Image (cartoon, rainbow, N blue to C red):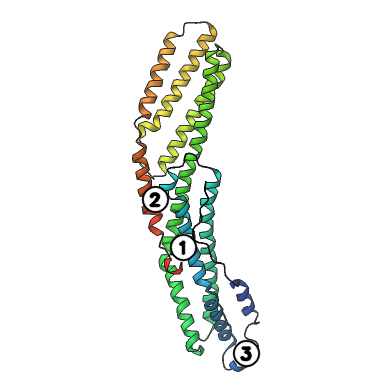
Amino acid sequence: MLDLKGIRMKKPLIIFGIVILLVTVGLSGCENKSAEKRTQATEDFAYVLSLIDENEIFELELHNINTAIYNFNFNYKWSILMNYAYYTESIMNGMENYENEIKSEVSVFENHSKNYTQLKSEADLEQLTKSESDKMEKAEAIISDYLTDESNVNMVLESMGKYREFVDTIRYAQIIIENYTTKLNIMNSLVTADNAEAAISYVSDLVQLCQEMYNNSKKKAELGLANYNEAAINSTLVLKEAWEIYEEYLNLVIQGRDSTAKYNEYSQKYAEAMALSADENINEINNQVDEWYQNNIFAYLDLFAEYGY
């Protein structure tokens, strides 16, 4: 996959947690002898307000959340992934990395907000200067913006996780189909060579792979991104039955018994499976998944956009 990158995330110039530790032990503002009328707690809070303002502490986290959503969409929206012939582990890791970036920024923001609120509660706000009060008002507005959209952050994270799980079921289906095709080709070669004894073990593999196909299809449908045809899902179970019958047919061949009726039974069951699988409308599925993506991930692309570029 061409690993496209959108906008890059900003990194803070200072670790806010260390700053909180410094003011807690009273190392900030100690040299400011001109403000002796103010309490130490107020001095500490004023110092932190200055650092927050200069380094855009709260803005950075919201910017980075917006950036991660933007980059997730830039690289992994369904209109892009639906055209991929094969899904790799790196795609899955890339999607999860953006989810983890958002979770990390949320955690950092909430820790900063908690520390900020603690320092504020200990300060005498009436002792703040006009400039310091303005900085506090700005910080309060950013925290308010986050709290207003906190539920939306949680919802887009949940949707990203579900979408990644959906794509992963397709990735796993591709692996199953690849294994199925390999086993089928080997079995056909052995049957053509009249080696039923060797071929029968591969039929058992095909039976197991059909069950895996069914389990995978059920899981994909249960995620709810599209309305999958129940008959098409069940076609893999019918195909499984066909191979079980074919296994019985090969046993009859090995035993030198009449196998014509059993082969006809297999042929009918196989044709039934193929007919059921034909009911799946891939274009309609893609349209439904794209609509789900638009409503559940793309719709949040502007989340905290005012803090982006």
The answer to whether any part of residue 208 appears in the image is no
SS under mark 2: helix
Report, in whole angstroms, how far the alpha carbon at label 1 lies from the one at label 2.
17 Å
| Spatial CA span between label 3 and label 2 | 55 Å
Question: In the image, is residue 234 above or below residue 74?
Answer: above
Q: Which mark is residue 293?
A: 2
Task: Rate crowding at label 3 as few (under 14), some (14 to 19) or many (20 or more) other CA atoms within 10 Å.
Answer: few
**Residue placed at 47% from the left, 85% from the top?**
133
Q: Is residue 137 above or below residue 154?
A: below
Q: Amino acid at mark 3?
A: Asn
Q: Is label 3 or label 2 in front?
A: 2
Mark 2 crowd level (few <14, some 14–19, many ≥20, 10 Å Cα): many
Image coordinates for residue 147, horizontal then vertical, percent: 43, 68
Q: Secondary structure at mark 1?
A: helix
Q: How many marks?
A: 3
Q: Which residue is mark 1?
A: 66
The image shows residue 263 at horizontal and vertical percentages of: 44, 13
- Given residues 301 and 137, the one toward you in this image is 301
* Quarter where residue 195 is shown: top right
Q: Find numbered disc 3 in the image and state the secondary structure of the residue it sits on.
A: loop
Instruction: Using the image, determine if residue 156 lies above or below residue 203.
Output: below
Q: Which amino acid type is marked by label 1?
A: Asn
Q: From mark 1 to mark 3, how far is it between C-alphas? A: 38 Å
Looking at marks 1 and 3 on the same chain, the residue that comes earlier in the sequence is marked by 3
Is the residue marked by circle 1 packed among few (<14), some (14-19), or many (20+) residues within 10 Å?
many
Q: Residue beneath label 3, please?
A: 32
